[in-house]
Image (cartoon, rainbow, N blue to C red):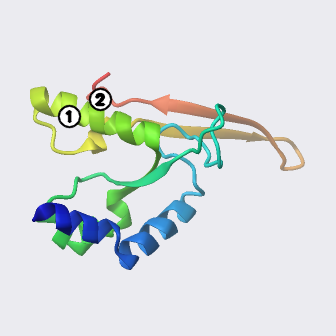
Amino acid sequence: MSEGIFKNFYNSRRWRRCAKAYAQSKLHICERCGGYKTGTKDDGTRQRWIVHHKKPMDATTIQDDNLAYGWDNLMFLCIECHNAIHHEMDTYSKHQALTSGAKLLRGRRREVSFDENGDVIVIQDIDSIDENTPP
């Protein structure tokens, strides 16, 4: 029964519009690794992207519009980062009782320097990992 709920949700026009708008708001840049959405990967295969729920959807949370559609609970991820988060959630939840992949997300900070004309001269991405984040 619950599989039908998820299928209906993720195939709904409302979810597709929400996910598309969220991805556009993030400029199609993965929020975990910073990768930019291109049509294909280096090996020629098609890159895949997903709008991920930080608090996982279940039969109860999917009924809560704030969790299901709220942008505070969403992340734009490449499929590799999405799979890595779910792998980490599965691995660590068995040992540390994690209930959400949100703690497993790597924080990113970007420092930008400009020249006297206001043109960008240096962009440096700095990864910051919370001390409570599993390796």
Of badges 1 and 2, the one in the foreground is: 1
Mark 1–mark 2 distance (CA, rounded to whole Å): 14 Å
Dot 1, crowdedness within 10 Å: few (<14), some or many (≥20)?
A: some
Q: Residue furthest top?
A: 135
Q: N-terminal of the two: label 1 or label 2?
A: 1
Q: Quadrant of residue 82?
A: top left
Q: What residue is pinned by disc 2?
A: 133
Categorize mark 2 by other alpha carbons within 10 Å: few (<14), some (14-19), many (20+). Answer: few
**Residue under the image location 64 percent in, 43 percent down:** 40
Q: Position of residue 103 (x, y in %)?
A: 28, 39
| Left or right: 93, with 31 as reference point | left
Residue 59 in view, yes or no? no
Image x and y of residue 49, in percent: 49, 50
Residue at 26% from the left image edge and 71% from the top image edge: 8
- Name the residue tied to disc 1: 90
Quadrant of image for the C terminus: top left
Quadrant, the N terminus: bottom left
At 59% from the left and 45% from the top, the residue drawn is 46
Residue at the image position 50 percent from the left and 67 percent from the top: 20
Of 73 and 84, nearer the camera is 84
User: Does residue 40 appear anywhere in the picture?
Assistant: yes
Q: Secondary structure at mark 2?
A: loop
List the single residue furthest toward the bottom.
Answer: 13
Amino acid on which the number 2 mark rests in the picture? Thr
* Left or right: 76, with 15 as reference point: right
Count the labels in the image.
2
Q: Would you identify the image quadrant in which residue 131 lies?
A: top left
Q: Is residue 2 above or below residue 33?
A: below
Residue 36 in the image, given as x and y percentages of width and height = 62, 45
- Helix, strand or loop at disc 1? helix
Q: Amino acid at mark 1?
A: Asp
Going by the image, does 65 lie left or right of 114? left
